[in-house]
Amino acid sequence: MSHAVAGKNYLNESSGLWSWLTTLDHKRIGIMYFVSVMFFFLIGGIMALLLRLELFSSNAQEGISFLSSLPNVIKGDANPADLYNRIMTYHGAIMVFMVIVPGIPAILGNFFLPLQIGAKDVAFPRLNLLSWYCLMAGAIMAFATLFLNKVDTGWTFYTPYSIRTGASVVLMVLAVFIMGMSSILTGLNFIVTVHKLRCPGMTMYRIPLFVWALYSTAIIQVLATPILAITLLLLAMERVFGIGIFDPKLGGDPVLFQHFFWFYSHPAVYIMILPAMGVISELMTTFTKKTIFGYTAIAYSSLGIAAVSFFVWGHHLFVSGQSEVAGIVFSFLTMLVGVPTAIKMFNWLATMYRGSIEFTAPMLYALGFLFLFAIGGVTGIMLAVVPVDVHFHDTYFVVAHFHYVMVGGTLMSIMGGFYYWFPKMFGKMYNMTMAIWSWVFIFIGFNVTFFPQFILGAKGMPRRYFDYIPEYEQLNRISTIGSWLIATGFVIGLIAMIRAITKGEKAPDNPWGGKTLEWTTSTPPPHDNFTNEPTVTAGPYEYK
Amino acid sequence: MGTHHSTHNHGAAHSSDSAHHVTPFNVYVKVAVALFALTFLTVAAHSIREHLQPFSALIAFSIATVKAYLVVAFFMHLKYETNMNRAIFISGFLFLALLFILTTLDIYTRITQNSVL
Amino acid sequence: MSTSRIVNGVEVATHYKDDTHQYLSNKEGIWLFMATEILMFGGLFIGYIIYHTMYPEMFAEGAKYLDWKLGFVNTLVLIFSSFTMALGIYFNQKNQPKKAVMALGATVLCGAIFMVIKYFEYTHKFHLGIYPGQMLNLEMVKPVHQNLGLYFGFYFCMSGLHGLHVLIGMCLITWVMIRNIRGDFHSNYYTPIEGVGIFWHIIDLIWIFLFPLLYLVG
């Protein structure tokens, strides 16, 4: 058992790149994920900016295409439509598999799950490191396809196009397979950690809600991702051997691909949002200085959302040739997920009621989440209605919906979580004014970018198209300008974080007065977290 | 990393025996014999399958399920495992069943709409 | 955590209370991984069942090319290997490492026999022009159903993925066998063998269903 040595913490207890690349410390692994995921977010974000630049003008009218004006060394001999499809594919694949799915669990979960339950580490530290390497290996393979034959199928790889296209689909799906393994191993690790490594007195009803969220997410990760694995393997076999399972040429069913693919990918979006909701619970209670309203309801609703998420995948297939009977069944099941979700939203509002609200950057992100996720969630329920979806499927309405929940939801929450836990992770305080300005640009920019897209979709603008008819141009221009506002916000935020890490003020152990166990350690935490194993005698949010 | 490499250790204290359930040797033998017998039964049923129609597939898979139970319960020790491990293992089958049921719901009701597949 | 200490003759990582705590956690992790293996193979079974009900005559035609006697022998081989695998753990629980090593060796041998039989099955099919999916040689095979390749796509994918797992299992068993020879295991510590064993039993389990599905029901 090591004792806390003055000045020694997990960051400086050993130095050198090798000590990081071979670390078994969950906190260091969390930081490694932080750096890599931020890098992937940057690449995926740049791709988004490129897409929006292409969509700034309706080419048909002006005969100009932004993507055509790119230097040949970037675009090769591709025409703008093909180029757009490729950038669109990588934007999606990078954001989904390298940013949002790993995002909160791998960064904040890895760092804080053991701390919040009073443990010294996760159950399987070596497996944890392996998870990170799997994500890196998969990412390298995925980026390699950029230099071979860029993939243009969209991140959903629908057959039969994904079978016929000349792109490096096999390498890309193998990359995603390996990244899926990263997700499975993280989920496996977290389940055993929550089951077995809680400190004395910490019953399942005293764990923080962030831990409940991570636990529910982990269950989805373990049970859903293997189906993605076999689906991608079969797609690879289809391309290499033409086995016929998804290819109509041999009597296969392309819609079966969609069933298999979405059986994972729908629960996957709950992998993205559940941890985000867990962060919001933490932020709500800390920055209202009030115990969370309805702890048990929020805990069970996390499990409930995880369970229901497995029953609804067919709502992605409403217009794919799925039968009407199946459509009705999936429509009904999809609407059920609104119930546990609403329970959380109302419980957060109730937590705020008569609380002592502090408008710090983390709290602004939490409030932003409430507003944006409400819009995103409600538009999801709209899309669950089959006749509505018949009109909106493959339009910008869907694009706006999922960006509201994924960016307005998960990304707001990651940012809130970063600004909340940043002092504990790095031992430095950041400039709150800069952080708030970052939020202002991101929040306003987000709405400017994506709200017009609801209108565009309702007016019929199709998604995944590099061009559109002139009547959509005005709203598209507003949307593109919004993307520049978002980018500005992130630049400000990045500068704030870098300045904080390099020359920020030293942070106190508990700058926000949080009640969960991670705030009882020194800042940054020592290598084995707690000098003496904590014992817990009460729930996690006992504010007076 | 810990440097002590535990070698041949007859004298190890046995205070953690309760976690290490030992299945008796003859139980393993009996299970193996049963599995062999059930395999013979499967091929015997296969050879008279015309007489067993339309149940031949059901019989084959029922026997397979019994064999699977024996492997899982005794060779894999699940009979003596915690409830959580049993729940974990079974959850795999439950979610597969879910994928199967709703996918076939789609495909077979497509047929009622006179679609090709 | 990168440090560990010895408890009851077992190397236990610092974040665990004792060897039992570590053992039970490791077991749970192993079972979680097995659930993922079941799900992954299960997807193939589901695909097979769906297409079998869509194209029953085509599947029956394809199944004619499978020799149930070879499948039968392979089933017995794998069952016996599961038996010896269980013994590999049993003998370590009884502190009889030499017998454990023999049991593990027998398991690897059974795996090899399985793969040899599989090799003959595959090469015989290739000889007849039978390849998966669109690679099926329609001129050589002259099937009644033109999409017979779909059946063999499933056959080769399912038996191939299973065979790959047999090979992986053989490597893993060899690894724990070597560790057993080196004296790494005793009655309080044999978790790696147990993990490998559960993996091997899953492989047997999948074959128990694959055999009737491919060779008998056809």
Image: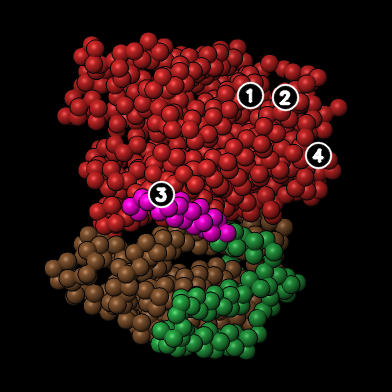
Residue at 33%, 22% in the rendered image: A50
Q: Name the residue under label 4.
A: A539
The disc label shown at residue A370, or none: 1
Specify start and end residues of the magenta stretch as a single range.
Answer: B94-117
- Secondary element under disc 3, as helix, strand or loop, is loop
Please state if C14 lies on the left or on the right of A490 as rendered.
right
The answer for how far apart the CA atoms under marks 2 and 4 are is 20 Å
Same subunit, labels 2 and 4: the answer reads: yes
In the rendered image, which residue does mark 2 sit on? Answer: A349
Identify which residue is drawn at 54% across, 22% down: A497
User: Which residue does the image show at 57% across and 53% down from the upper left?
Assistant: A188
Q: In this view, does B16 lie to the left or right of C25?
A: right
Q: Nearer the viewer, residue A265 or A357?
A: A265
Q: Residues within 10 Å of mark 2 (few under 14, many from 20)?
A: some
Q: What element carries label 2?
A: helix
Q: Are marks 2 and 1 in contact (CB under 8 Å)?
A: yes
Decide whether residue B102 is among the magenta residues: yes
Q: The red chain is which one?
A: A
Mark 4 to mark 3: distance in Å?
A: 55 Å
Q: Do marks 3 and 1 share a subunit?
A: no
Q: Is residue A467 magenta?
A: no
What is the chain identity of the residue bearing mark 3?
Answer: B
Say whether mark 3 and mark 2 are on the same chain: no
